[in-house]
């Protein structure tokens, strides 16, 4: 046995050594010359360094570090031991020993990286001579890791974009993060010790709070929206998530709440809901909401066989006002008519603008005699009204149809068809009059006319009597470039005269001809582009409209792929426009359609975006490239702050989701400049350019006439 170990054993008795072995703590001992004289089993396990490699050496540092450096025991051995404490980040003098140190540090042991707590204490012989140092080690890696995680969590809470607050079991606030102050206006000093009820607005139903506390008492997390009141008295909506924190004995020790300010989101949702229920121009109900209320009335069980009447109003000569005075004059007239209608009915009656110049009134619990008097009043007021607009005076009248029904009738479509038939007959009989529906005056003439239009559509399809028009879409944003056109369909009648799309497209939809028209458009467009490669090369995007029926056509996808392969038109030049309503109504098909054509780099635009209640909710599911903002929002943004806010909101959502925005119905430079300032990417409308035949556009772009085959096909 080496002499130094013998000396140590003389100072530390066998009892001492046995005690070191028995305590189970990782321990090693060095003598006054820093040689290891004791290295227990626990130390071997902790460091991964066998005792055989360090006994009677000065290499105990290998158990803790990659390179040689003093251990804590070595520091204690030195004469100036209190002057070398800078070797450790956390070090202090031992409380119970006159010559000892405590420290903690990360160590790279042979067994891996560990966070260790050390305590090294010197021991002396009976004469007070320093004999060596005993160092004990404790692995605090898990504790340190937990501490680091807690610090990370604390930093995350402090910098969270949501307000976070913690209360004691009685509900008194113990902690708030900075976002809480930012949202509510209350500082930490103002809320600590107070109840979160300081935010109560009195406008949230009490049942919400009852559900909240019931969920928390049952150990569940509560989530919900609350209408709160800030310190300054203003109100805000918050999305809340609250949970109880329990100790090991399942006793509640805290409540934790996370609160997000969703005021903007709620207000936008309310605007969308209003847009989904009300006509934006007149503030009357829209067709969808009118039919919902009609359906509710038909399903109202309390009073059966009660008489109700629907009044259908179609303005006469409205097209003259619209064409000669412009859209602004037409819109002003519609607003005035809406006001006249309100003055003629009772509070419980529902008035709607169904579209264009058509209105409907649901006269609840109303006899036919009473309804006729109301209709006569409406006719008189509209006939007596004069529109003074830009030094011109316009006079209009109305055709009115009435249909009496009871709650026994369940077919809304038939009810609306009947009252429409009566109105149509009033118009046919000379206008400015009222007709009450009966089975003998059903609108056979109208059906006959529609059948004639259907036949004309079939002939036009068979004889290629359609013309493709193109309307330029102008890039506004700096990163939006290239020529962009939307293609529009026009039909030629038997005399080669243009038939307005508003006349034949609704009939095509109603009689399931729209998909055939779409196929004609796709096929002829692709062939035309194939024959005019230079025009295609200079064009960034060609937009083609697809009808709602095409979204349910199981064979259209393959047809488009065939045309792409046949004509070798690059898919990234083509953008298909689908209406928001058609996409949402056929969501699964739309997703598949977009995904499959995306393989060919085709792009997609969501037309009339914002016109439906669920616009933002479904947007994540539709990987479209462009959002075409509904024109009803755009055309009055220079006069209507709500419309301006809606366009801004759609732009912001589109930007976040990486989608370009297109504004339609851009009728003047004032609107265009506003859109540019908002950051809208593209603009389209008569204020940009009117539609023109695509053959003319290509000819002017190429500086030459198209080949005769192209013109014939057009």
Image (tube, rainbow, N blue to C red):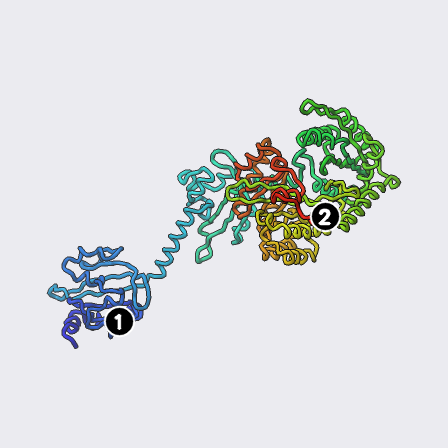
Dot 1 crowding, Cα within 10 Å, few <14, some 14–19, many 20+: some
Q: Which structural element holds mark 2? A: helix
Where 37 sits versus 369, above or below? below
Query: Residue extending furthest top?
Result: 391
Report whether 77 appears left or right of 682: left
The reply to whether residue 415 is in sight is no
Looking at the rendering, which quadrant does residue 295 occupy? Answer: top right
Viewer-proximal residue among 444 and 5: 444
Residue 439 visible in the current orientation = yes
Q: Which residue occupies 12% across, 64% down?
A: 129
Is residue 309 positioned above or below 81 on the image? above
Which residue was labeled with disc 1?
Answer: 40
- Disc 2 crowd rating (10 Å Cα; few below 14, some 14-19, many 20+) is few
- Of 402 and 603, the residue lying toward us: 603
Q: Position of residue 594 (x, y in %)?
A: 61, 54
Relative to 676, is 356 on the left or the right?
A: right
Is 593 left or right of 125, judged from the image as shown?
A: right
Q: Which residue is mark 2?
A: 712
| The N terminus: image quadrant | bottom left
Observer-side mark, 2 or 1, equals: 2
Q: Secondary structure at mark 1?
A: loop
- Locate residue 72, reporting x and y percent: 22, 61
Foreground of the two, 360 or 480:
480
Query: How many numbered dots are placed on residues in this image?
Result: 2
Res. 443 image quadrant: top right
- Residue found at x 53% / y 48%: 658
Which callout, 2 or 1, points at the residue further toward the start of the chain?
A: 1
Location of residue 25 in the rendering, given as x and y in whole percent from the top left corner: 29, 67
**Residue at the left extreme of this rendering:** 127
Gap between marks 2 and 1 measured at Cα: 101 Å
**Which quadrant of the structure image shows residue 342?**
top right
- Residue toward you, 380 or 483: 483
């Amino acid at each position: 046995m080496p002499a130094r170990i013998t000396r140590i054993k003389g100072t530390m008795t066998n009892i001492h050594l046995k005690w070191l072995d028995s305590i189970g703590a990782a321990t090693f001992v060095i003598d006054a010359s820093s040689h290891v004289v004791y290295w227990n089993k626990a130390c071997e396990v902790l460091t991964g360094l066998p005792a055989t490699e360090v006994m009677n050496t000065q290499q105990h540092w290998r158990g803790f570090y990659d390179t040689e450096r003093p251990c804590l025991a070595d520091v204690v051995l030195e004469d100036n031991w209190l002057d070398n404490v800078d070797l450790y980040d956390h070090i202090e003098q031992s409380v119970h020993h006159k010559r000892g140190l405590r420290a903690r540090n990360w160590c790279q042991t042979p067994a891996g990286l560990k966070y260790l707590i050390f305590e090294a204490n010197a021991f002396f012989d009976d004469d007070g001579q320093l004999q060596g140092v005993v160092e004990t080690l404790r692995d605090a890696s898990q504790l340190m890791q937990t501490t680091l995680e807690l610090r990370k969590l604390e930093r995350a809470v402090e910098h969270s974009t949501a307000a976070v607050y913690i209360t004691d079991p009685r509900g008194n606030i113990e902690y708030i993060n900075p976002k809480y102050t930012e949202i509510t206006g209350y500082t930490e000093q103002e809320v600590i010790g107070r109840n979160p009820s300081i935010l109560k607005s009195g406008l949230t139903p009490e049942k919400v709070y009852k559900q909240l506390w019931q969920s928390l008492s049952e150990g569940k997390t509560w989530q919900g929206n609350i209408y709160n009141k800030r310190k300054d008295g203003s109100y805000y909506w918050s999305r809340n998530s609250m949970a109880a924190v329990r100790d090991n004995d399942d006793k509640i020790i805290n409540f934790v709440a996370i609160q997000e300010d969703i005021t903007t989101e709620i207000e936008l949702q309310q605007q969308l809901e209003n847009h989904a229920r009300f006509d934006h121009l007149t503030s009357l109900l829209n067709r969808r909401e009118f039919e919902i209320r009609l359906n509710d009335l038909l399903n109202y069980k309390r009073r059966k066989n009660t008489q109700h009447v629907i009044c259908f109003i179609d303005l006469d000569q409205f097209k003259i006002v619209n064409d000669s005075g412009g859209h602004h004059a037409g819109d002003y007239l519609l607003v005035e008519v809406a006001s006249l209608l309100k003055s003629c009915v009772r509070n419980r009656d529902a008035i709607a603008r169904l579209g264009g110049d058509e209105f409907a009134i649901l006269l609840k619990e109303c006899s036919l005699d009473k309804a006729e008097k109301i209709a006569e009043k409406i006719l008189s007021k509209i006939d007596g009204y004069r529109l003074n607009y830009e030094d011109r005076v316009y006079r209009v009248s109305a055709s009115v149809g009435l249909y009496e029904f009871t709650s026994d009738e369940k077919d809304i479509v038939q009810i609306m068809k009947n009252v429409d038939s009566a109105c149509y007959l009033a118009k046919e009989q000379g206008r400015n009059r009222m007709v009450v529906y009966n089975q003998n005056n059903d609108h056979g003439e109208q059906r006959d006319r529609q059948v004639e239009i259907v036949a004309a559509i079939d002939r036009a399809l068979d004889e290629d009597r359609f013309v493709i028009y193109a309307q330029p879409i102008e890039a506004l944003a700096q990163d939006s470039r290239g020529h962009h056109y939307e293609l529009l369909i026009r039909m030629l009648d038997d005399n080669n005269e243009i038939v307005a799309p508003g006349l034949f497209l609704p009939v095509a939809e109603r009689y399931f001809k729209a998909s055939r028209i779409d196929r004609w458009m796709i096929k002829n467009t692709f062939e035309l582009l194939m024959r005019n490669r230079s025009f295609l090369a200079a064009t960034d995007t060609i937009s083609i409209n697809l009808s709602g029926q095409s979204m349910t056509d199981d064979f259209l996808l393959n047809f488009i792929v065939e045309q792409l392969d046949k004509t070798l038109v690059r898919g990234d030049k083509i953008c298909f426009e689908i209406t928001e309503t058609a996409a949402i109504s056929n969501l699964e098909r739309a997703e598949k359609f977009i995904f499959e054509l995306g393989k060919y780099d085709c792009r997609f635009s969501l037309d009339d975006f914002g016109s439906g209640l669920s616009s933002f909710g479904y947007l994540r599911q539709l990987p479209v490239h462009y959002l075409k903002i509904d024109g009803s929002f755009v055309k009055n943004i220079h006069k209507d702050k709500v419309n301006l806010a809606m366009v801004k909101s759609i732009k912001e959502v589109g930007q976040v989701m990486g989608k370009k925005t297109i504004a339609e119905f851009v009728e003047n430079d004032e609107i265009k400049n506003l859109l540019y300032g908002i950051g809208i990417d593209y603009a389209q409308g008569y204020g940009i350019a009117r539609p023109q035949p695509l053959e003319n556009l290509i000819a002017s772009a190429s500086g030459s006439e198209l080949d005769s085959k192209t013109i014939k096909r057009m």
